[in-house]
Image (cartoon, coloured by chain):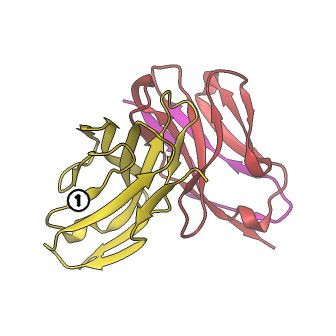
C-alpha cells in the first residue's frame, strides 16, 4: 500500500529536550515536506525537500531542522523544543508533477511542556 | 498575495440534507485546487482535485466541486450528507503555480446530525 509513515503518533516532551519525528514514504517520491497544523490557521509548511540532500525552508522554519540523506526518509528535528512548537505535524510527499496532490502521513501530535 | 479562504469555520447539517463547504482563492496563476478531508485522529485524505480540465470535478464518497474562475471559487458539495462525513475539510492550492508548497485554508469543520 502506498503510504507515508510517521512516528511517533503522539509525543509529550519537556522544553529543551531534543527530539526527532521520523517520516518515510514507499512511493519513490522525490519531493517531501513537513507541515504543522494549528487551530484556525490550517496547515503551514515548515520545510520541504526536492530530492536527496536538497532541502529548503517553508513558511515557518524557525526552531526546526531537517535532513534528506535517503530518498524515502525525511526526519524533522527539534533541537530545543519550546511550548510554541506544540502542534500537530504532518509529513507529505508527492510525485514529480504534483498535479495529483500530496499524500499525507497520519500526523504526530507533539506537546512540549 | 496568494491565499485560500474557507468562508465557514463550522457547518452543521442534518443527515440526508445537502452539504455546501465554501472556498475562495486568490491567485494570479491559473490554479490547481484541492479539497482534503481529515477525520478525527487521521491524516489528510485527498477528496478531489481540479487541474485545468473539466470545471466540475467529482471526488470520492459522493463529493464534487465546481471551479468558477469568474467568482474565484471552488465550493465543495454533496447532495446528501452521511454521518460518516463528519470531519474537517481543507481547501488548498499550489503556491505560485508550482507544487513546492500548498496554501491551505483554515479548514471547515462539518458536523452531521441524525
Give the left or right position of residue A67, taking residue A9 as reference.
left
Residue B5 lies within the magenta run: yes
Q: Is residue A94 visible?
A: yes
Q: Residue at x 71, y 25 (%)?
A: B55
Chain A rendering hue: yellow
- Judging from the image, what is the letter of the chain drawn in red? B
Tell me the chief SS of the magenta region: strand
| Residue segment shown in magenta | B1-25
Q: Is residue A39 visible?
A: no
Q: Position of residue A86 (x, y in %)?
A: 30, 69
Residue situated in front as seen by the camera: A15 or A39: A15
Query: Dot 1 surroundings within 10 Å: few (below 14), some, or many (20 or more)?
Result: some
In the image, B40 versus A74, the foreground residue is A74
Please name whichever residue, A76 or B95, is drawn nearer the observer in this view of the structure.
A76
**Compared to B63, does A107 lie above or below?**
below
Chain that bears disc 1: A
Q: In which quadrant is the C terminus of chain B drawn?
A: bottom right
Q: Is residue B22 left or right of residue B101?
A: right
Residue A38 position within the rendered picture, expressed as x and y whole percent measured from the top left: 39, 60
Was residue B13 drawn as part of the magenta stretch in this picture? yes
Q: Is residue A35 above or below residue B30?
A: below
Q: Position of residue A91 (x, y in %)?
A: 41, 53
Q: Residue at x 47, y 40 (%)?
A: A28
> Quick one: SS at disc 1?
strand
Q: Residue at x 46, y 26 (%)?
A: B27
Reading the image, the residue beneath label 1 is A77
* Quadrant where the N terminus of chain B is found in the figure: top left
Q: Give x and y (percent) for residue B102.
A: 44, 39
| Total marks placed | 1
Amino acid at each position: 500500500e502506498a503510504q507515508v509513515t510517521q512516528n511517533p503518533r503522539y509525543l509529550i516532551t519537556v522544553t529543551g529536550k531534543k527530539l526527532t519525528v521520523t517520516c518515510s514514504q514507499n512511493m519513490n517520491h522525490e519531493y517531501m515536506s513537513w507541515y504543522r497544523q494549528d487551530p484556525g490557521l490550517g496547515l503551514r509548511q515548515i520545510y520541504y525537500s526536492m530530492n536527496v540532500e536538497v532541502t529548503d525552508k517553508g513558511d515557518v522554519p524557525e526552531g526546526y531542522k531537517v535532513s534528506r540523506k535517503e530518498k524515502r526518509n525525511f526526519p524533522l528535528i527539534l533541537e530545543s523544543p519550546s511550548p510554541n512548537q506544540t502542534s500537530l505535524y504532518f509529513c507529505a510527499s508527492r510525485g514529480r508533477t504534483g498535479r495529483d496532490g500530496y499524500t499525507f502521513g497520519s500526523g504526530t501530535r507533539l506537546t512540549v511542556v | 498575495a496568494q491565499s485560500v479562504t474557507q468562508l465557514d469555520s463550522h457547518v452543521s447539517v442534518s443527515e440526508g440534507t445537502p452539504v455546501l463547504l465554501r472556498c475562495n482563492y486568490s491567485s494570479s496563476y491559473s490554479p490547481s485546487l484541492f479539497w482534503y478531508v481529515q477525520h478525527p485522529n487521521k491524516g489528510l485524505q485527498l477528496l478531489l482535485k481540479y487541474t485545468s480540465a473539466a470545471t466540475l470535478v467529482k471526488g470520492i464518497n459522493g463529493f464534487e466541486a465546481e471551479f468558477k474562475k469568474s467568482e474565484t471559487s471552488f465550493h465543495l458539495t454533496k447532495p446528501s450528507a452521511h454521518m460518516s462525513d463528519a470531519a474537517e475539510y481543507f481547501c488548498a492550492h499550489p503556491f505560485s503555480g508550482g507544487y513546492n508548497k500548498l496554501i491551505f485554508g483554515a479548514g471547515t469543520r462539518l458536523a452531521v446530525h441524525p
